[in-house]
Image (cartoon, rainbow, N blue to C red):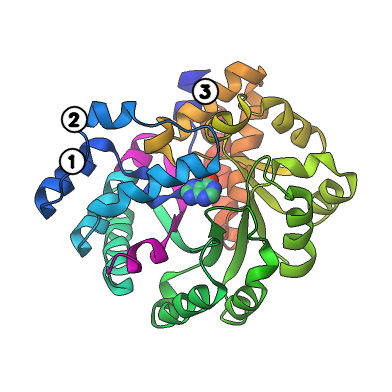
Amino acid sequence: MRPFIERLPKAELHVHLEGTLEPELSFELARKNGITLPFDTPEALVEAYDFHDLPSFLTIYYAGMSVLVDEDDFYRLTWDYLAKAASQNIVYAELFFDPQAHTARGVAFETVITGIRRAQQDAAQRLGVETQLILCFLRDMSAESAMEHLEMARPYLDWLVGVGLDSDEKDNPPTKFAAVFARAREMGLKLTMHCDVNQTDTLANIGQVLDDIGVDRIDHGVNSLQSDALWQEIARRRLGLTVCPVSNRFVVQSLTSAEIRDMLDKDMLVTINSDDPAYFRAYLNENFVALQEEGGFTADEIVTLVANGFEAAWLPDARKSEYRDLLDKAAAGRVDA
Ligand code: HPA
Ligand code: ZN
């Protein structure tokens, strides 16, 4: 199945750019920016990755960002991910970024978004990878800070497709950001929010993203299966769920293959994604391969999961159809996409 998975043209809808920072690049940028890392080698840095829940991951994830300083650093981060994506036959990606994690360190919003944008344009031209950008708010920061950053983004609205919500979910429910997301909607942006796996109050939070926020998609959202009312509403609205198997394994010791199969059986729009591939040491193909092995998915089921990624994308229907045709041809072995 690995060669089959590798050759399929794929979409990735849940990947944090800051989560694609490879240890080797950390060291290179640290050297360039005169920053001393508390490790001697990239291998030692990886050995210190000790994730067992969301907070333990986030501590290491935010510390890692200190090496991202100037516009070229954000360009390089984005370019390296997109080159990797191209090598995995990812033809379309929606990219999260966390501006508050950078402005809090004195890096200007403009520096961050301009570097990312340049790499997106170069990747479209030189690698043939189409991308759109999603601004994520950090839910453990205030709603006022989120609103300020939404306003900072106003001059760059054409560079954004949507807004998201990430970081520590505990005691930071979706409704904390209701006004921010309502304004983002007025600005013409799509809305998504993380509902991470096995969080305190997860069912209440999933209910809020449906009823109070009116999201266009849900990131993770696996726990919705525990409530008939929630999963039925998600299925009825045909909302995409961006599930991240290897990321989940750090929290629930499984790739949630049983849950993903259950979602397919319930005709939910479940998609497969990598989340923070440099930290979890698995890009999109590795997520699919591991998931297939754990869950015994058939080739047709894999194609459905990939097709769901295009259907749940924030693209015009005509563009989605083009990608779907490309996928069907590759799956049938008619073209090497
Ligand atoms: N959940 C919450 N915050 C995050 C994640 C995630 O999966 N990845 C990066 N920040
Ligand atoms: Zn995420």
User: Where residue 48 sits: x, y (%)?
Assistant: 34, 30
Task: State the separation of the CA atoms marked 2 and 3.
Answer: 29 Å
Q: Earlier in the sequence, mark 1 or mark 3?
A: 1
| Position of residue 320 in the picture relative to residue 79 (left or right) | right
Q: Is residue 84 magenta?
A: yes
For disc 1, the marked residue is: 27
Looking at the image, can residue 93 be seen?
Answer: yes
Say what secondary structure mark 2 lies in.
loop
User: Where residue 308 sits: x, y (%)?
Assistant: 64, 43
For disc 3, the marked residue is: 289
> Looking at the picture, which amino acid does disc 1 mark?
Phe
Q: Is residue 94 magenta?
A: yes
Q: Earlier in the sequence, mark 2 or mark 3?
A: 2
Which quadrant does the C terminus fall into? top left
Q: Which residues are magenta?
A: 82-106
> Looking at the picture, which amino acid does disc 3 mark?
Val
User: Where residue 37 sits: x, y (%)?
Assistant: 20, 42
Q: Any mark on residue 41, and which? A: 2
Callout 1–callout 2 Cβ contact below 8 Å: yes
> Looking at the picture, which amino acid does disc 2 mark?
Thr
Give the camera-side residue of 15 and 19: 19
Residue 41 appears in which quarter of the rendering? top left
